[in-house]
Image: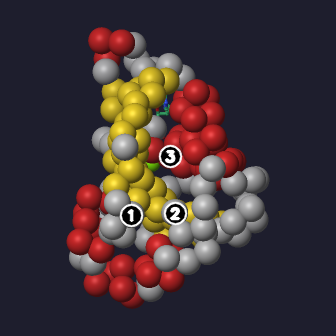
Amino acid sequence: MEYRVETFSPSETKEFAREMAQKAKPSDVITLIGDLGVGKTVFTQGIAEGLGIKEPVSSPTFTIVQVYDEGRMPFYHFDVYRIGGVEEMDEVGYEDYFYGDGLTMIEWANLIEEILPKKRTEVTIEKNLEKGFDYRLITVKTIE
Ligand code: ADP
Ligand code: MG
């Protein structure tokens, strides 16, 4: 299944992510794809808010995964932008997160394609400057 949503401000993107998080179930995995500055962190903040996490969320620049425990289920935020190889995922014990009791979100998931769960939701965010500086096209694809 695949559907598209257009947003015209950061708050609309956040709101959309918040709604997605409200429907999330333990062991769900969302992959997030998009260029720098497109709104991946904004989207992630919406996901965190939707789970009831009050703590500010940023990109885990120096660790592969950041864990937030205060929401209605754990939130595992991976950013694999700087990963050297999938063996680094083994080192953090990624399976405990992917198939665990929380919601996993992975930025730059294309870099670890071979270990992604078969069942996942792929979110792609794109700009289109012809439609304005704050326009974003969000494509949600269910893969199973
Ligand atoms: P990334 O994490 O993908 O590198 P960020 O989320 O850090 O990107 O930054 C996205 C930037 O784009 C923010 O400055 C945000 O305010 C801006 N922005 C403008 N319009 C939107 C929109 N519709 N959705 C999300 N972010 C937007
Ligand atoms: Mg970011």
Tell me the colour scheme of the image: secondary structure
Q: Secondary structure at mark 3?
A: helix
- As displayed, is residue 33 above or below residue 128? below
Q: Residue at x 33, y 67 (%)?
A: 118
Q: Residue at x 26, y 58 (%)?
A: 110
Q: Residue at x 37, y 43 (%)?
A: 1
Q: Secondary structure at mark 1?
A: loop
Q: Is residue 80 visible?
A: no
Amino acid tagged 1: Lys
Residue named by callout 1: 119
Residue 41 - label: 3
Ligand 1 is within 8 Å of the C-beta of the residue at disc 1:
no
Q: Position of residue 6 (x, y in %)?
A: 45, 23
Q: CA distance from mark 2 to mark 1?
A: 8 Å
Image quadrant in which you'd find residue 19: top right
Q: Position of residue 57 (x, y in %)?
A: 61, 54
Between marks 3 and 2 in the image, the one whose residue lies nearer the viewer: 2
Residue named by callout 2: 28
Q: Position of residue 50 (x, y in %)?
A: 68, 47
Q: Is residue 108 visible?
A: yes
Left or right of residue 48: residue 98: left
Ligand 1 is within 8 Å of the C-beta of the residue at disc 3:
yes
